[in-house]
Amino acid sequence: MTTAAVSTLAPSLVSRNIDVVQPFQLDRSNLRGRMVRLGPVLDEILGRHAYPGPVAQMLAETITLATTLAAALKYEGVFTLQTKGDGPINLMVADITSAGAVRGYAQFDEDKLKAALEAAGGASRPWAPVPTLLGKGYLAFTVDQGEHTQRYQGIVGLEGDRMDDCVRHYFTQSEQLATGIVVHAGLSDGGNWGGGAIMLQALPDEDAGGVASDAKPSDLEDDWRRAMALLSTVTPAEVLDPALPVNDVLFRLFHEEEVRAYDPHGLAAQCRCSRERVVTVLKSLPRDEVAELKVDGAVDVACEFCSTHYRFDDAELETVYGSAS
């Protein structure tokens, strides 16, 4: 890691406990991890849409996982986590820039959702299995670092009941990298969305923050099992509670593993849409096709991520196409 490290982790070292990524390392077992906790960021993104509860729940987990996975990468650009399936939720997209700007949205079929929930026992449960809501399909990881760079994409089939099951399946099948992850998301008593995740990975010595290891394979397996056993004890309240400092959680879980914290990173809900971007898209389309999109004498373009509407009447369209000539 390139960030400055805290030599020993004591509780409450980090004052920011929400909308944050906290990288850390377990020196004893040579594992690297990160903890994510989202509050207002998640609440703002979901608040822009009137998603049914199960859809909002699934998207909340996906956004939380995207921020967690992105924090494990070294990139300059955009990381995207996407699902596509034949279930009621046919598409989910969550992306985060290397600067920490987060956004996400879901597409779903209301009739199929209602039928699926009725068959599964109703919409009152805290979450519905992935097969019920997403159906058969795939999970895609994409890193886009802009022009003149090669875009990376990894794809794996949707496997498991929960989104974190799907992520573990991806690392097992595509990266062959031992990965443990837990994710929780939900509404607080005050009606606000929150999400949190903790992820651990076994990495080669050269990627382990400068901590070399000459452990035998059997010792490494024991270290991994011990770390996974500790990770399995974390509760949703510990992951989600904004009043509980993230370092307190890590200290409670891993103090015997010699946990070491690194500089945290802040996150913000921020869409990248703009009127200028919409104008660029309109210019690329034949004018007669755009004219067919008019409703009440104007073209209305809505951003799927943030629900912002951009309206273009005849005079504004004339300006758009006049500037394209």
Image: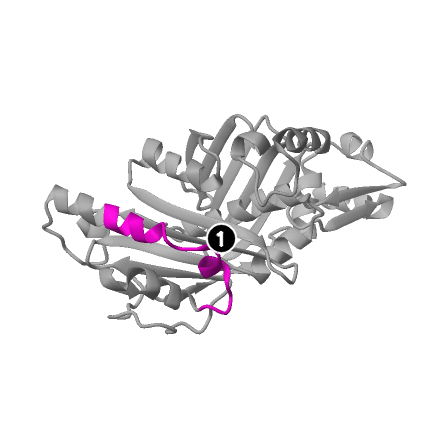
Q: In the image, is residue 226 part of the stretch drawn in magenta? A: yes
Quadrant position of the N terminus in the picture: bottom left
Q: Is residue 203 visible?
A: no
Quadrant position of the C terminus in the picture: top right
66 is higher (above) or lower (below) than 141? below
For residue 87, side relative to residue 143 (left or right): right
Number of callouts? 1
Q: In the image, is residue 215 part of the stretch drawn in magenta? A: no
Residue ID at (44%, 36%): 166
78 is higher (above) or lower (below) than 25? above
Spot occupied by residue 299 in the image (x, y as percentages of width and height): 81, 41
The residue nearer to you, when weighing 309 against 315, is 309
- The part of the chain drawn in magenta is 225-244
Spot occupied by residue 256 in the image (x, y as percentages of width and height): 23, 62
Spot occupied by residue 85 in the image (x, y as percentages of width and height): 56, 28
For residue 32, side relative to residue 325 (left or right): left
Coloring scheme used:
one colour
Q: Is residue 289 visible?
A: yes
The residue nearer to you, when weighing 251 against 2, is 251
The residue singled out by tag 1 in the image is: 97
Residue ID at (57%, 59%): 41
Element class at badge 1: strand
The residue nearer to you, when weighing 24 against 181, is 181
Residue placed furthest toward the front: 121
Q: Main secondary structure of the magenta part?
A: helix
| Residue 40 falls in image quadrant | bottom right
Spot occupied by residue 128 in the image (x, y as percentages of width and height): 57, 38
21 is higher (above) or lower (below) than 149? below
Residue ID at (24%, 47%): 224
